[in-house]
Structures are given as C-alpha cells and as structure tokens.
Image (spheres, rainbow, N blue to C red):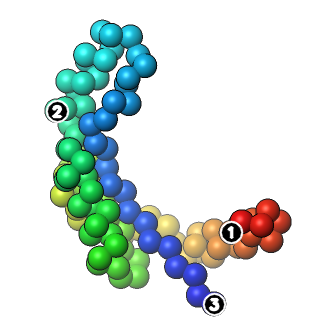
C-alpha cells in the first residue's frame, strides 16, 4: 500500500484578495499585484505541469523571483526522506484517530 503525494506551488495571481480593505489600500494593492503577478492563465500552467510531468522528488514552482510568478520550472524539494516518513506517520495517526 504505497501512498504518494504530488506537490507544486502555482505562485500568486492577481485576485481581489484586498477587497475588504480601505479604498486607498485597494488602489495600492491593485497596482502592486498587477506588476508582480501573472494572470490565472499563466499561474495554472504550474499546476498542469505538476500533474502531467510526475517524477519522484520533483516539485514545480514559478520561475520568477521568490517563486511568485512566471512559467513553471522543476526544482528539488527541500524536504528529506526522514521528513516524508514523519509526515506519513502523522497522516497514519490522523487517519486512525479522526477517521480522515
């Protein structure tokens, strides 16, 4: 019974996340997000790449600075095999105790 998880980080897309803020903050946020993020069409490419190019120990992120935006690129995960074993043990405990 082998469990697998596929992980990717799509980046940030310009949304209405600032919708409830004061009007002057909305204007600033709109301009800043427009400059540093991609639209949903580019952001979704990282998700598609992650599901169609599945290899062990591969993780997809946007190419841009700080992985905020950009076309997808493959990077090595920052976690070790020990971390994965600990995470799987935590999942097992959650499944047993909380019927997840």
Residue 1, which numbered label?
3
- Identify the residue at image location x=25%, y=52%: 43
Q: Rate crowding at label 3 as few (under 14), some (14 to 19) or many (20 or more) other CA atoms within 10 Å.
A: few
State the image coordinates of residue 63 (x, y, percent, origin top left).
21, 56
Q: Quadrant of residue 28?
A: top left
What is the spatial separation of the Cα atoms under label 1 and label 2, in whole angstroms?
39 Å
In this rendering, would 96 be left or right of 54?
Answer: right
Separation of residues labelled 2 and 3 (CA atoms): 46 Å
**Which is more N-terminal, label 2 or label 1?**
2
Residue to which mark 1 is pinned: 91
Q: Nearer the viewer, residue 33 or 20?
A: 20
Name which residue lies at 49% across and 67% down. 79
User: Distance between the Cα atoms at labels 1 and 3?
Assistant: 14 Å
Q: Does residue 77 appear anywhere in the picture?
A: yes
Q: Does residue 22 sit above or below 91 in this rendering?
A: above
Q: Is residue 67 above or below residue 74?
A: above
Residue 44, x across and y down, in percent: 27, 57
SS for tag 2? Answer: helix
**Secondary element at image label 1:** helix
Q: What is the count of numbered marks?
A: 3
| Quarter of the N terminus within the rendering | bottom right
Q: Which residue is mark 2?
A: 35
In which quarter of the view is residue 85 placed? bottom right
Q: Residue at x 19, y 53 (%)?
A: 42
Q: Between disc 2 and disc 3, whose residue precedes?
A: 3
Q: Is residue 97 above or below residue 16?
A: below
- Tell which tag, 2 or 3, sits nearer the viewer: 3
Q: Are there few (<14), some (14-19), or many (20+) residues within 10 Å of tag 2?
A: few
């Amino acid at each position: 019974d082998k469990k697998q998880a596929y992980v990717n980080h799509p980046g940030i897309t310009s949304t209405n996340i600032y919708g409830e803020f004061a009007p002057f903050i909305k204007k600033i946020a709109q301009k800043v997000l427009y400059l540093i993020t991609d639209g949903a069409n580019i952001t979704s490419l990282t998700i598609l790449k992650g599901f169609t190019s599945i290899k062990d120990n591969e993780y997809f992120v946007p190419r841009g600075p700080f992985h905020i935006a950009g076309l997808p690129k493959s990077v090595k995960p920052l976690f070790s095999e020990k971390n994965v074993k600990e995470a799987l043990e935590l999942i097992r405990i959650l499944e047993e105790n909380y019927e997840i």
